[in-house]
Image (cartoon, coloured by chain):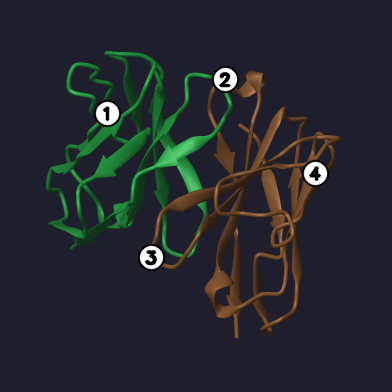
Amino acid sequence: SAVISQKPSRDICQRGTSLTIQCQVDSQVTMMFWYRQQPGQSLTLIATANQGSEATYESGFVIDKFPISRPNLTFSTLTVSNMSPEDSSIYLCSVGTEVLGNTIYFGEGSWLTVV
Amino acid sequence: GDSVTQMEGPVTLSEEAFLTINCTYTATGYPSLFWYVQYPGEGLQLLLKATKADDKGSNKGFEATYRKETTSFHLEKGSVQVSDSAVYFCALRYSGNTGKLIFGQGTTLQVKP
């Protein structure tokens, strides 16, 4: 399996501010993804973080709101911009690679509350 | 489009009871199927998986069999413990190997002593 570290693990943010979440993996991975889990809900894919190129966003998510970087095969960041209370969620980084078979592993998540 | 449907929760059981959480899916092609578990205040952990029809995934006493004929992947455990209380998510992964997961809505399990 892969060990995935996310920072921050929890934060309380002011409305209108932006926050960057970091995801660090202990090995090189082909695929990195960012998911959102709103309170009491299931997980929804925000985007696929592509190494060396722009992220691929899912319907309903845009780069201006959720800019993503992936400078190498072990690290990615997700920024939640101009936050509102509706952005209060758990944001999870997930990874996969051929070495891991077809299994996708998740980080512990970053629990954001916007006040 | 592809989708995953789980039984409504919460499911409340007494310790040592038998557990079944139903999961059915709709997909084109031949997806891989997963169960993830989320304990209170934690992230997602992979519980078990199956990659092709008739495969049985198992872990920590939990089992699920990939049934292509009924498009199902029901989670079972013979004797639940209080420590099994969590939210369980069924998910499928596209056979196109994009890595994208489609999740069910999650089922909350509460086990009482």
Q: Which callout, 3 or 2, points to the residue nearer the camera?
A: 3
Element type at marker 3?
Answer: loop
> Looking at the picture, how far across and down is residue B103, in whole percent?
40, 43
Q: Amino acid at mark 3?
A: Gly
**Mark 4: few, some, or many residues within 10 Å (few <14, many ≥20)?**
many
Checking the image for residue A40, the label placed there is: 3
Alpha-carbon distance for marks 4 and 1?
33 Å
Q: Earlier in the sequence, mark 3 or mark 2?
A: 3
Q: Does residue A6 appear to the left or right of B69 in the view shown?
A: right
Q: Amino acid at mark 4?
A: Phe
Q: Amino acid at mark 2?
A: Gly
The vertical placement of B106 against A105, above or below, is below
Q: Residue at x 75, y 78 (%)?
A: A17
Q: Which callout, 4 or 1, points to the residue nearer the camera?
A: 4
Checking the image for residue A75, the label placed there is: 4
From the image, tell me which residue sits under label 1.
B64
In which quadrant is the N terminus of chain A drawn?
top right
Q: Does residue B103 appear to the left or right of A28 in the view shown?
A: left
Checking the image for residue B55, the label placed there is: none
Alpha-carbon distance for marks 4 and 2?
20 Å
The vertical placement of A40 against B47, above or below, is below
> Looking at the picture, how far across and down is residue B33, in whole percent?
38, 28
Q: Which chain is brown?
A: A
Give the quarter of the image for residue B113.
Answer: bottom left
**Mark 3: few, some, or many residues within 10 Å (few <14, many ≥20)?**
few
